């Protein structure tokens, strides 16, 4: 026969369990909100560029930039409804750091080559160091619904041997 003290202990136990579950739920929601603001997850770091003031930033001249030390940086601007440049040529086997920026609404870019899958949040630069090994032309489209021209927003990656 259970006395009331035992029953209270059970109640207290289940009360703690339910409070812990609610706390975990909110922590999960909060955690996903935080990670959502950081474009790309694997190896990505983000920084901010004001989309209204691209002048003076490398995004004013999008495309592949070869630095004095030989390293490569690719600056890609996403806007409704095009990527600039729409075709990016990179040499195979050489490390290229992709810098992606949306200047209006949320766009997305997914490249199977190089394991790129990034949500482009306006103003937040996604920085992705990648090495593309297999030569070829890889065509992809914007990966995040962005408006009436979404399906026409194509991007071509040409990996040159
Ligand atoms: Cu840009 Cu969909």
Image: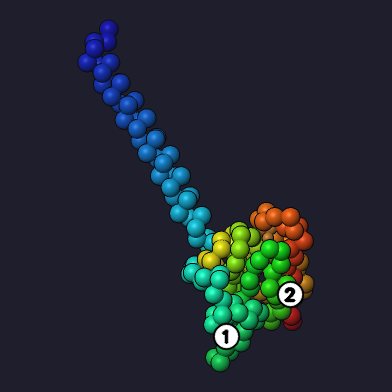
Q: Which residue is mark 1?
A: 71
Residue drawn at x 45%, y 54% is 34
Q: Nearer the viewer, mark 2 or mark 1?
A: 2
Graded by Cα atoms within 10 Å as few (under 14), some (14 to 19) or many (20 or more), the crowding at tag 2 reads some
Residue drawn at x 35%, y 35% is 20
Observer-nearest of 77 and 99: 77
Which image quarter has ligand 1? Answer: bottom right
* 70 sits to left or right of 132: left
Decide: is 124 above or below 94: above
Residue drawn at x 52%, y 66% is 124
Quarter of the image for the C terminus: give it. bottom right
Tag 2 near tag 1, CB within 8 Å: no
Marking on residue 134: none
**Residue 27 placement (x, y as % from top left):** 40, 44
* 31 sits to left or right of 39: left
Observer-nearest of 63 and 81: 81
Observer-nearest of 38 and 147: 147
Residue 19 visible within the image: yes
Quarter of the image for the N terminus: give it. top left
Residue drawn at x 56%, y 70% is 51
Q: Which residue is mark 2?
A: 87
**Residue 36 placement (x, y as % from top left):** 51, 55
Q: Determine the residue located farthest toward the left in the rendered image.
A: 5
Decide: is 86 above or below 108: below
Graded by Cα atoms within 10 Å as few (under 14), some (14 to 19) or many (20 or more), the crowding at tag 1 reads few
**Residue 18 placement (x, y as % from top left):** 37, 30
Q: Does the residue tagged 1 have its C-beta within 8 Å of any atom of ligand 1?
A: no
The quarter holding residue 39 reads bottom right
Element at badge 1? Answer: loop
């Amino acid at each position: 026969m259970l006395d009331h003290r035992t029953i209270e202990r059970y109640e207290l136990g289940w009360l703690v369990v339910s409070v812990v579950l609610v706390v975990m739920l909110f922590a999960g929601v909060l955690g996903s909100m935080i990670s959502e603001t950081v474009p790309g997850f694997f190896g990505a770091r983000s920084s901010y560029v004001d989309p209204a003031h691209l002048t003076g930033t490398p995004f004013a001249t999008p495309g592949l930039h070869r630095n004095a030390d030989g390293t490569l940086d690719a600056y890609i601007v996403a806007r409704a409804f095009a990527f600039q440049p729409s075709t990016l040529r990179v040499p195979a086997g050489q490390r290229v750091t992709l810098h992606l920026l949306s200047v209006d609404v949320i766009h997305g870019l997914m490249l199977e080559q190089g394991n790129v899958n990034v949500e482009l949040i306006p103003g937040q630069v996604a920085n992705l160091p990648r090495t593309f090994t297999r030569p070829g032309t890889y065509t992809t489209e914007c990966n995040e619904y962005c408006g009436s021209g979404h399906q026409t927003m194509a991007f071509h990656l040409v990996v040159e041997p």
